[in-house]
Amino acid sequence: MALNIGITCYPTYGGSGIVGSEIGRELAKRGYIVHFICSALPTRLTEINDNILFHEVEPTHYPLFEYPPYDLALAVKMCEVATDFKLDLLHVHYAIPHSISAYLAREMNRDLAYLPIVTTLHGTDITLVGADRSYLPITRFGILRSDGVTAVSEYLRKETCEVFEIGCDVTKVIPNFIDPSYYYRHEKECLRTKLAPNGEKLVVHISNFRPVKRITDCIRIFAALQGKVKARLVMVGDGPEKAQGEWLARQMGISKNVLFVGKQPAIVDYLSVADLLLLPSETESFGLSALEAMACEVPVIASNVGGLPEVVVDGETGYLAEVGDIEGMAKYATKILSSDNLQRKMGRLGRQIAVENFSTEKIIPIYMEYYDQIIEKAKKK
């Protein structure tokens, strides 16, 4: 039976917004009615149709409030949508503030019907608590008051159990995913010629340029390739560390071969011309850009942290190195970029693993089955 599902995610250029958008789009293809309840249309959601509806959350600007209370406005909108459209379930991405808003909406709606909540953790909730322990009680509350909780990797599930001191059986691992019919290597000769006019190899980094992504490590790794491989570095995305990365590229005398191309709606185009993806992050709960690269037959060099070892097979679809190991990552990059055979071999295996283990056809039915389980449990409350 097709369900009415509400989805709330941050509409920004980041993994949780991408995953939330893609879940909604895939459910809509399967006949579900999906209601996005967000402050803006999520980045990856390019079209609205009969099965996908968007409900904008607009905080009230009242003189009493120095900052408009978005979480309360979100709770009110969730309650309105749940009542008007008889939602079967709310699926929120991040506990803070989304699961708290969902809890308030459920309580406001309780006289009419019990509204089940599924919270998907992407890692930032734990980062938030790490930065400010005062958020631990309310984050833990949001997790425990959810009817279902999922984590995008086994690593994140274990971290959630330890940080919030909850049983590991509370959280189900459902990994991120790709649509193989969209994420595959396209012919993009015009783009490749534009980025590499002299036939250079293309090293790509894709992120939101937050400090945790270690943008300057990408610059230093690329600098270490000079004189060994003829290459250019393409930095896709935007964020607070962009200026620092640009400055370092100038300081190291490599700025003419480092291209900051900003946010790009068609990430698959850039992956289709890439020879290597760099992901030297401080931590990654999953590493969605690594999976997207693998689906496009691009070898990955990443940090050996978080959920990345669950995605990248060290020595087979790329290489893993310790955080900050510039020399090691540069050595691996040189090895891959110097051998077309190795690059192709790693790329093909990466594609195979991405399709077999992380495709929409494998992962979306897991979400659908989980929704059914949660709704059945909720009927007893």
Image (cartoon, grey):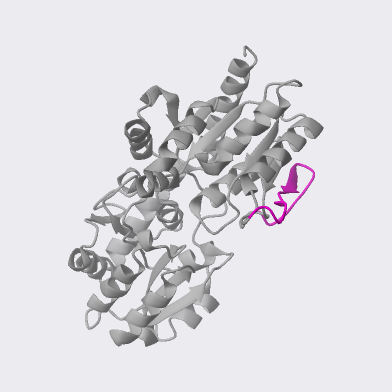
Does the magenta portion include 113? no
Q: Residue 151 in the image: x percent, y percent?
A: 44, 36
Q: Residue 330 in the image: x percent, y percent?
A: 23, 69
- Say which residue appears at 21% left-offset and 56% top-offset: 322
- For this rendering, which residue is in front, 279 or 239? 239
- For this rendering, which residue is in front, 77 or 217? 77
Q: Residue furthest front?
A: 64
- Say which residue appears at 26% left-offset and 67% top-offset: 333
- Say which residue appears at 58% left-offset and 45% top-offset: 20
Where residue 113 sits, quadrant-wise, is top right
Give the left or right position of residue 170, taking residue 64 as reference: left
Screen quadrant of the C terminus: top right
Reply above or below: 57 against 99: below
Q: How many marks?
A: 0
- For this rendering, which residue is in front, 304 or 313? 304
- Say which residue appears at 27% left-offset and 71% top-offset: 221
Does the magenta portion include 64? yes
Q: Residue 363 in the image: x percent, y percent?
A: 51, 36
Give the residues in magenta.
Answer: 45-65
Reply above or below: 44 against 263: above
Screen quadrant of the N terminus: top right
Q: Main secondary structure of the magenta part?
A: loop
Reply above or below: 274 against 27: below
Give the left or right position of residue 38, taking residue 337 as reference: right
